[in-house]
């Protein structure tokens, strides 16, 4: 009987008091000179001792003599982790298998490599679940944009989206030439980059995939500029990737700085070497990204000094208002000469 209650107590905590009571009863009864008085003493002790104390004594015994067992959730988590490890190894091996040569196979290689890195990110997420207080207190990022097409269709495309761990992305792409063909190229770049980044691919793999697609996807020459800013909403750190893109401007405490890095557009050269500008953004800052149609509007001012002065004068922090004012000023500066498409994106921290 004692053995049965003991096994039951291991399965369900509600049997613990009964198990302890039977043990105490047997111990006192067998040790007492008079079996009747021993049984009475055991019953009195059983009634007098509160359940909370007995439960506490049981828990202390468990911690002292029994190793802590894994919960069902822990076992499921470990199974998921092992499964992700297997998938990561498969994707890495497939990436190496398809890595030779510069053709469609290389695109497949980038995809498998990106999948492996994505799985690795998931594994890291499993190690530290839950939103930190820093993430909850992160500054809000407001994004606005404005554009102007000098033909029926603009060759520029832009997009802003959130992804990953508290990341905000802004992309501007300018396709080769003008009109519908340029629009097709820039839209392909923006759409592909946004989908790959949202799926967990890192920037290096995503950009190399887009570059390979433009180089191999069509017999005709295809290329496009890429201006990509990725802002960490928690730290304010911004990584700005430029592939043939115009300068970016940062307004901080009334002063405006210009950021630029020369690099060819995507779809031009193989073996893409990706570099970025690292900048810290603080509350109250504005990040302004423009297409080259904006910076080329004044041939007498190739460094875009007019834009820095215009941003310094502006008192508004509304991103849509700032973007609209810049586009209007750039269109005005073109005058009667041939104009390029204009696109402006503004992030207000």
Image (tube, rainbow, N blue to C red):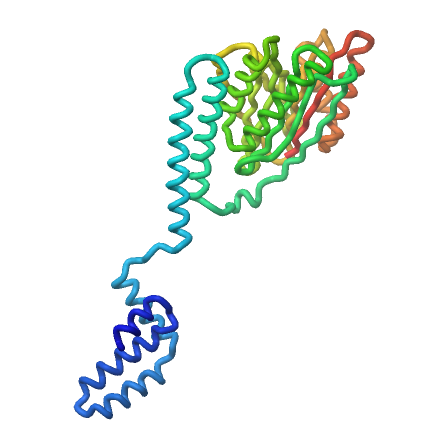
Q: Is residue 136 above or below residue 204?
A: below
Residue 174 horizontal side relative to residue 49, left or right: right
Residue 262: tell me if it is visible. Answer: no
Residue 88 percent coordinates (x, y): 40, 33
Q: Is residue 82 above or below residue 329?
A: below
Picture mark count: 0
Residue 218 percent coordinates (x, y): 59, 12
Residue extending farthest to the right is 336
Q: Quadrant of the N terminus?
A: bottom left
Taking the spot 26% from the left edge, 83% from the top edge, the residue there is 25
Q: Is residue 71 above or below residue 192?
A: below
Taking the spot 47% from the left edge, 30% from the top edge, the residue there is 115
Residue 233 horizontal side relative to residue 94, left or right: right
Residue 218: tell me if it is visible. Answer: yes
Which image quadrant is residue 341 in? Answer: top right
Taking the spot 68% from the left edge, 26% from the top edge, the residue there is 345
Q: Which of 227/76 is in front?
A: 76
Q: Is residue 195 above or below residue 299?
A: below
Which image quadrant is residue 37 in? Answer: bottom left
Residue 274 percent coordinates (x, y): 50, 18
Q: Quadrant of the C terminus?
A: top right
Q: Which of 59/299 is in front?
A: 59
Residue 59 horizontal side relative to residue 337, left or right: left
Q: Which of 165/91 is in front?
A: 91
């Amino acid at each position: 009987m004692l053995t049965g209650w003991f096994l039951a107590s291991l399965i369900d905590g509600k049997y613990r008091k009964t198990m302890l009571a039977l043990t105490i009863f047997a111990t006192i009864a067998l040790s007492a000179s008079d079996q009747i008085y021993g049984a009475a003493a055991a019953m009195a002790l059983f009634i007098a001792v509160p359940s909370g104390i007995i439960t506490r004594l049981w828990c202390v015994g468990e911690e002292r003599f029994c190793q802590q067992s894994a919960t069902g959730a822990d076992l499921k988590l470990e199974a998921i982790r092992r499964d992700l490890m297997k998938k990561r190894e498969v994707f890495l091996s497939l990436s190496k298998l398809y890595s030779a040569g510069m053709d469609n196979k290389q695109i497949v290689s980038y995809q498998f490599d990106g999948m492996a890195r994505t799985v690795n990110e998931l594994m890291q997420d499993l190690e530290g679940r839950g939103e930190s207080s820093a993430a909850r207190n992160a500054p809000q990022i407001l994004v606005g944009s404005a554009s102007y097409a000098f033909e029926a269709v603009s060759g520029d495309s832009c997009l802003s989206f959130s992804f990953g761990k508290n990341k905000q992305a802004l992309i501007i792409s300018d396709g080769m030439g003008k009109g519908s063909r340029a629009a097709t190229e820039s839209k392909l770049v923006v759409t592909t980059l946004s989908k790959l980044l949202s799926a967990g691919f890192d920037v290096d793999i995503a950009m190399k995939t887009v570059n390979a697609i433009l180089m191999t996807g069509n017999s005709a020459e295809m290329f496009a500029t890429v201006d990509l800013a990725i802002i960490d909403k928690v730290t304010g750190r911004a990584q700005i990737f430029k592939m043939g893109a115009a300068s970016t401007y940062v307004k901080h405490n009334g002063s405006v700085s210009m950021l630029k890095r020369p690099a060819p557009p995507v779809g031009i050269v193989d073996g893409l070497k990706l570099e970025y500008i690292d900048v810290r953004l603080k509350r109250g800052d504005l990040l302004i990204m423009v297409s080259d149609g904006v910076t080329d509007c004044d041939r007498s001012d190739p460094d875009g000094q007019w834009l820095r002065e215009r941003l310094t004068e502006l008192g508004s922090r509304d991103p849509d208002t700032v973007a609209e004012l810049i586009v209007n000023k750039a269109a005005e500066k073109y005058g009667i000469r041939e104009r390029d498409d204009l696109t402006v994106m503004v992030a207000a921290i």
